[in-house]
Image: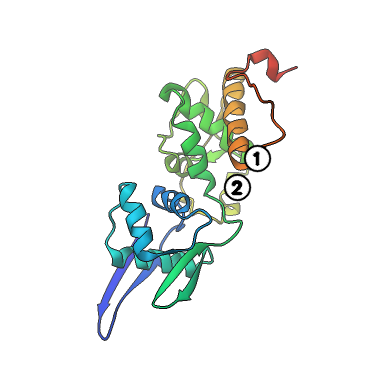
Amino acid sequence: MGIGITITRGTQTFIRFVIKSNLVMSEYYNILTKVMANKQMSISSIARELKKNGYDQHRLILTGYLRALHETGYMEEIDIPPSKVYVFKPGMKRDVYNIVKEHLKDIDISERLGIAVFILSSLFHRPCFKYELELLGIEARKTETVKESKDARLKEHRNAVTRIKIPIDDPAFEINGETSEIQINGNRVLIDIIRDLIDLEGLKAKSQQTKLHKSEFYS
């Protein structure tokens, strides 16, 4: 994740995080948001919960990470003597790439690239870049259903992306031709994402189909 750590020893030990790329672009951040959902927690409590999830980080590294999240506006740091507690600010959401990645993990690997390109292109209204696919854990390449984009506005699209750093020579990809099956499966994933992000309790049917037929997307 491109975070450098400098440890200086003097009257006290401190950690300075140098953020070279987006701080929240990591599975670690995702786990942290789940562990701390709607909770105020001390560093010791956070460390224990992270260890249960398989993340046994040194306390100094965890402290620096939490302070970096606080300094970049993602988290509140509250003094409750004799310790500090941390809480995510209301309304903070998981990163879009991690959300999409999580929902693609159950998709057959042979279909994952096409669906990922469809979803990112639909969300951003532009071709998606190689780096963005790598954030989803997917190798960017040309296939029968995915082609390298020759969009004349690629430079403009690249410059418009300010939340992450797209390499200047990064190729972009888009769906190749008529791919109704990719669109259907991509829409299913998008619907699942919406259901996870929005509280539909009291609105949805009590008994639900687990799968939709293709025809139902066009009715």
Tell me if label 1 and label 2 are in contact, CB under 8 Å: no
Residue in view at x 64 percent, y 15 percent: 214
**Number of residues whose C-alpha sits closer than 10 Å to that of mark 2, classed few (under 14), some (14–19) or many (20 or more):** some
Question: Does 21 sit left or right of 213 as displayed?
Answer: left
Residue in view at x 61 percent, y 53 percent: 160
Q: Secondary structure at mark 2?
A: helix
Position of the N terminus by quadrant: bottom left
Question: Does 183 sit left or right of 35 as displayed?
Answer: right
Q: Position of residue 92 (x, y in %)?
A: 57, 56
| Three-letter amino acid code at the position of disc 1 | His
Question: Does 208 sit left or right of 115 as displayed?
Answer: right
Which residue is label 2 attached to?
Answer: 157
Which residue is label 1 attached to?
Answer: 125
Instruction: Using the image as rendered, state which of residue 207 and residue 74 is in the foreground.
Output: 207
Single out the residue that lies furthest toward the bottom: 11
| Three-letter amino acid code at the position of disc 2 | His
Q: Please tell me whether residue 86 is drawn above or below residue 119 in the rendered image.
A: below
Q: Closer to the camera: disc 1 or disc 2?
A: 1
Separation of marks 1 and 2 at Cα, in angstroms: 10 Å
Q: Position of residue 101 (x, y in %)?
A: 47, 38
- For residue 8, which quarter of the picture? bottom left
Position of the C terminus by quadrant: top right
Q: Is residue 152 visible?
A: no
- For residue 180, which quarter of the picture? top right
| Image coloring type | rainbow
Q: Position of residue 153 (x, y in %)?
A: 62, 44
1 or 2: tag closer to the N-terminus: 1
Instruction: Using the image as rendered, state which of residue 195 and residue 79 is in the foreground.
Output: 79
